[in-house]
Image (cartoon, rainbow, N blue to C red):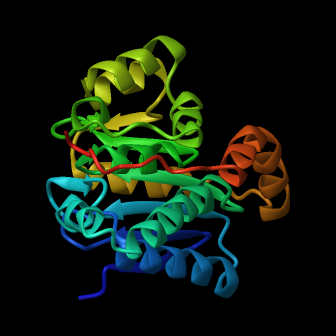
Amino acid sequence: MDRVKWTVDDNTAILTMQSGENRLNISFCNDMLKALDDIETTTNVTALVVDASDPKIWCNGMDLDWLLPAIGRKDPEVQEFFKIQDELYRRITFYPMITVAAVTGHAFAGGAILACSFDFRYMRSDRGFICFPEVDLHIPFLPYMDAIIQRTFPKHLVFKAELTGHRFTATELEACGAVYKACSTPEATVQEAIAWAKTLNKSRAIVKTMKNTMNSGIAHLLETVVHPNLDSLGG
């Protein structure tokens, strides 16, 4: 089975992540980036919705089962992974159309940052959390990651999210505006996200220009990103 697949419904592309827990590793990020490139270059859609096939997990963050041993071996693929993960976050943040994450299950750690990279989020309310457990994993946020979170969460909740690892429900996040709408089931989450996205038939050109301005600070941070030494990851 392909790690990702996508279809088109009117003016909206629906990309489904279908790699189990959708852990972020080189192969998964590459497949996501290729799908995003194909959608942009081979269609005329003006909106993107991203959901997941797993009934419990939307995206569970970095593939630590691979990454931790690779760091221990000083595998050069580690730096390759960090660069491609940065590129995935950048690509979604600056994607030249309106993007909607249909968060149908847990979004943890890097998966939560991925959800924050979208312009809007729909999220199921019956199950699943958005959570940043990096404080317990001893993984520091890079400045651009913090900026992505700060553009999504109100300031007082950024501190709660990053420093306590609180597990936010859809209802909590809808109340503060971080989630556009909390939906009763995963099916409703996807259906309502697609239905709303289809009403947003905005020009790619103006959306791209606006995103470049709105996210100029993130662009600068991505240009100067330096990854810390993660030999003590999880310690």
What count of labels does the image hold? Answer: 0
Q: Point out the image quarter for the N terminus.
A: bottom left
Horizontal relation, residue 173 to residue 53: left or right:
right
Residue 46 on image: x %, y %: 67, 65
**The one of 169 and 112 positioned closer to us in this rendering:** 112
Horizontal relation, residue 38 to residue 110: left or right:
right
Residue 205 on image: x %, y %: 84, 62
The answer to whether 136 is drawn above or below residue 53 in the figure is above
**The one of 220 and 11 positioned closer to us in this rendering:** 220
- Residue 131 visible, this orientation: no
**The one of 53 and 88 positioned closer to us in this rendering:** 88
The answer to whether 105 is drawn above or below residue 21 in the figure is above
Q: Residue at x 25, y 23 (%)?
A: 166
Residue 35 on image: x %, y %: 51, 79
Q: Residue at x 74, y 38 (%)?
A: 217
Horizontal relation, residue 114 to residue 37: left or right:
left
- Residue 183 visible, this orientation: yes
Q: Residue at x 52, y 50 (%)?
A: 196
